[in-house]
Image: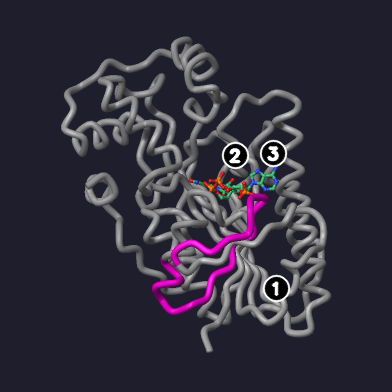
Amino acid sequence: MRAKIVMPGGSGFLGKCAAHYFYKLGYDIVILTRGKSKIINNIQYLNWDGKTFGEWTKHIDGSLAVINFTGKSVNCIYTPENKKEIIESRIDSVKIIAEAILQAKNPPKVLIQSASLAIYGDTKKVCDENAPHGTGFSVEVCERWEKEFFKENLPHTRKVLLRIGFVLGKNGGALETLSKLTRRFLGGAIASGEQYISWLHIEDLNRMFEFVIKNEDAIGIYNATGNSPSQNKDFMKALRKALKKPWSPPVPVFAVKIGARLFMKTDASLALTGRNCIPSKFIREGFKLNFDNLEEALTDVLK
Ligand SMILES: NC(=O)c1ccc[n+]([C@@H]2O[C@H](COP(=O)([O-])OP(=O)(O)OC[C@H]3O[C@@H](n4cnc5c(N)ncnc54)[C@H](OP(=O)(O)O)[C@@H]3O)[C@@H](O)[C@H]2O)c1
């Protein structure tokens, strides 16, 4: 019998890719979505609301692993309503998944939470898992999210939280936005270009999920990112090269702020801030990245 992995919020950028990765490895996949229940390419989508019990709880019982991807995208303008939804979608789903696991006769062996490196704030200092937290709205979201995740004791389920970096993958994530701009000859460094991008190839992220599922000693918080963070100016240079586009002038702060709000409908802080993180715990525990070179990773994703 194929072991089952349940992926709440798995209908998005990271979840879809993880679902296909694990399906190919021989697992059954159930994605929990606020959308309609359906089966697409052998992946089962099951309706839930992200905050109350329903049919979906039966699938938690007897599953091998749960990987929670749920959360309103942070790629939006930070209005009071959006901020509320960003926080509540994360806290509510963490809470109800823990309750479902507590009620299961055969609880999953491991619960993996997708979280974010944004907890370290805007910093150029190298951050491993023990680095101090930053300040601001994104940090507050991460702190509340993580506190909720570790609150409930699940006696039979390992808890692993991945603070995920800037994921390089096809059809989604921030790379899609930066690639569109670069294709339109707007791929210059953003502001000073000195802010760090802690990037990782999506294949390595999926391998990290696999690593923590299979390694029974894996527990607690991990930085899920590559080992070679780049400053924005170097990242944009590598992206222009991968897309065969010429040099573009840097984009000043005021233009980023106006462009983000009016054209991208997002918060400029996503482009203007950054962090310099390394996956210390993964490396210590023997994980090997397949992609450590930015140009190779971008060329592979954009081919
Ligand atoms: N992508 C990255 O590079 C990255 C980096 C660091 C951390 N993360 C974190 O990893 C998680 C997954 O990222 P992603 O890029 O795959 O995000 P995504 O594409 O936005 O997918 C998240 C999923 O959450 C569900 N969702 C959205 N709003 C919700 C709400 N109000 N209530 C309940 N469910 C809601 C949606 O599923 P339905 O509409 O089907 O219900 C959506 O498909 C997120 O928590 C994100 O913050 C991502």
The three-letter amino acid code for the residue at tag 3 is: Ile
- Mark 3 → mark 1, Cα distance in angstroms: 24 Å
The three-letter amino acid code for the residue at tag 2 is: Ser
For the point 38% across and 37% down, the residue is 176
Q: Residues within 10 Å of mark 3 (few under 14, many from 20)?
A: many
Q: Which residues are magenta?
A: 21-41
Label 1 belongs to which residue?
Answer: 60
The three-letter amino acid code for the residue at tag 1 is: Ile
- Mark 3 → mark 2, Cα distance in angstroms: 7 Å
- Mark 1 → mark 2, Cα distance in angstroms: 24 Å
Q: Which badge, 3 or 1, is on the more N-terminal residue?
A: 1
Q: Nearer the viewer, mark 3 or mark 1?
A: 1
Give residue 249's position: percent from left, percent from top. 27, 15
Answer with the quarter of the image where residue 246 lies: top left
- Ligand 1 closer than 8 Å to the CB at disc 3? no
Q: Which element is circle 1 on? A: helix
Q: Which element is circle 2 on? A: loop
* Residue 150 image label: none
* Residue 86 image label: 3
Q: Residues within 10 Å of mark 1 (few under 14, many from 20)?
A: many
* Residue 73 image label: 2
| Circles 1, 2 touching at the beta carbon (< 8 Å) | no
